[in-house]
Amino acid sequence: MKLLVTGGNGFIGQEICKTAVRHGFEVISVSRRGYPDNKESWMSQVNWVSANIFNIDRWTGYLSGMDGVIHTIGILRERPEHNITYERLNGDSVIIAASAAITAHVPVFVMISASDAPPLLKRYIRAKRDAESFLLEQKTRSVIMRPGLVYGQGRKGSKLIASLTRLGSQIPLIGTYYTKYSPVHVTVLAKAVINSVMHEEIQGLIDIGQIEKLGMSIPIEEGLR
């Protein structure tokens, strides 16, 4: 099987690429920088394409024959002076990538979204929800992963924040608020993504609990090609 991962050299993207490679997938990553800054042995098995997602002529040719597209592009911090905004990166990039995948008849499109966001990040989550709405309106299969806080070794300080979030979820009255951001390990999310590609019955919105089940309870078949 073949996968194309947008933003594959990022924190979540790399874990998805690594998980896919370890389970026999052929993987192409599309990102602005191309090859990741760090180097690990599994990376030689990925085709790292350097391309801006908005320059569709540069990367859409790789969609031919793909079994799935995984979209991991998104930002938490805007840089308007460089045209890096929530609306553009968290919203428009999804619609562009999904539209290209639909045109190329890719069977499934997976979006990494978010369960929620603090009040100060209303535009962040609104952009993601707008992109989700677009996907849900399409006739083709789409999977929308809504993790809480994604943590792991490649994201500095995320393990500590995850621990604090777990503690906050146990505090009476405010615990429900923190539950919306329940931590998900990046490896669990990556496995959930790969399983969602492989199982055609999985589609639509996938919440934190479902991500945990997909990433930990459903076995991934070895050696798929």
Image (spheres, rainbow, N blue to C red):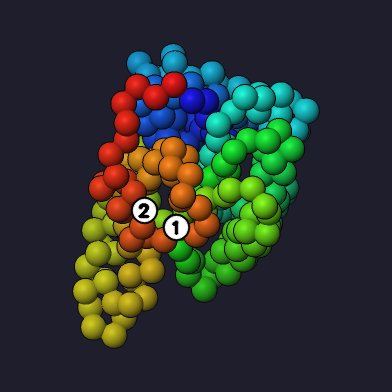
Q: Which numbered tag is attached to residue 211?
A: 2
- Where is residue 54 drawn, in percent x and y? 73, 38
How many numbered marks does the figure carry?
2
Q: Where, by quadrant of the figure, is residue 183 drawn?
A: bottom left
Residue 35 as seen in the image, left or right of residue 25: right
Residue at 38% across / 69% down in the picture?
Answer: 180
Q: Foreground residue, 76 or 145?
A: 145
Determine the secondary structure under disc 2: helix
Q: Where, by quadrant of the figure, is residue 122 drawn?
A: bottom right
Position of the C terminus by quadrant: top left
Q: Tell me the crowding category of disc 1: few under 14, some 14 to 19, or many 20 or more residues within 10 angstroms, Cα based.
A: many
Residue at 49% across / 25% down in the picture?
Answer: 1
- Where is residue 51 drawn, in percent x and y? 67, 27
Q: Foreground residue, 126 or 192?
A: 192
Furthest residue to the front?
201
Furthest residue to the right?
57
As displayed, is residue 93 above or below residue 39? below
Asked if the residue under mark 1 is in contact with the one under mark 2, i.e. CB atoms within 8 Å, the reply is: yes
Q: Foreground residue, 90 or 202?
A: 202
Residue type, numbered disc 2: Ile
Q: Tell me the crowding category of disc 2: few under 14, some 14 to 19, or many 20 or more residues within 10 angstroms, Cα based.
A: many
Q: Which numbered tag is attached to residue 206?
A: 1
Residue at 26% across / 54% down in the picture?
Answer: 160
Instruction: Choose the circle earlier in sequence order: 2 or 1.
Output: 1
As displayed, is residue 17 above or below residue 216? above
Furthest residue to the bottom?
173
As displayed, is residue 36 above or below residue 183? above
